[in-house]
Amino acid sequence: MEILSRFRAIMASNIQAILDKADDPEKTIDEFMRSLTSDLGKVKAETASVLADEQRAKRALDECRGEIRKLQSYAEKAVEAGRDEEARKFLERKRPLADKEEKLQASYDLASSNAASMKQLQDKLVADIGKLEARRVVLKGKMAEASFQQKVNASGSSTAGGQNSIFDSMDEKVDRAYHEAMAIAELRAGNKKDDIDELFAQFEKQASNNDPDDELAAIKEKMKKKE
């Protein structure tokens, strides 16, 4: 999927550092907002498909493991009834399912990893959008302050004490709005720590290749101990 192929780039992006270096912060914020909103829309659109893949893979894996348990149970019952040849046939049918289980496990691990990645992407994008909104609040506040200063300069007012009081009040409002926006951003993000490399780790399962005769002997040994 396109959005998953950009996972590392999105997760490694540092909005704050980029904005600090921008020549035109307002333009940069608008561009990033459009880009992040588009990415968030893609994540939400593809999440349902990714979760469906994970559920299908889990269901197939569970069915395979259920078949293995069933054949093992049949073999044990056949041995208890003294029908070793039938038990051997059940164990022979069970043997190739071990390879199938390994492949299904790998498919499920990949689907599960993709689902986790989509969740991490959504959290990161929501957090970045929140940071941009907070930065926009500060930027607009500073622009309003600069505009007010220009009007004061143009009026030629000499009441410096009154001006300072007004500016202090404006600074307080801007700071308060900024902190409120940042608090909302943190709540949306959930303050989660991401470990990108762990999301792409693959789990390897080694299939059991026991010979049916060996398994048959193991069942008999198990029955002896019960006697």
Image: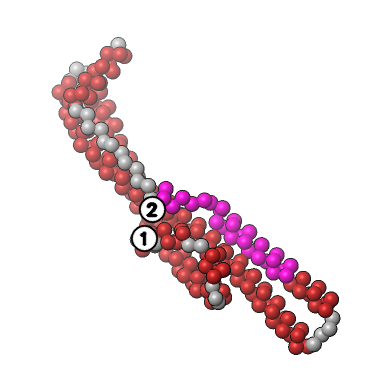
Which amino acid does the dot numbered 1 rest on?
Answer: Ser
Label 2 – label 1 distance at C-alpha: 11 Å
Residue 187 part of the magenta-drawn span: yes
Q: Is residue 48 left or right of residue 74?
A: right
Rendered residue at 54%/70% (across/down):
21
The residue indicated by pointer 2 is: 114
Which amino acid does the dot numbered 2 rest on?
Answer: Asn
Q: Quadrant of the N terminus?
A: bottom left
The disc placed on residue 87 is: none
Badge 2 or badge 1: first in the primary sequence: 1
Rendered residue at 70%/77% (across/down):
145
Residue 81 or 8: which is nearer the viewer?
8
Residue at the outermost left position = 85
**Disc 1 secondary structure class:** helix
Chain part drawn in magenta: 171-199
State the predominant SS element of the stretch in magenta.
helix
- The image quarter containing residue 213 is top left
The residue indicated by pointer 1 is: 5
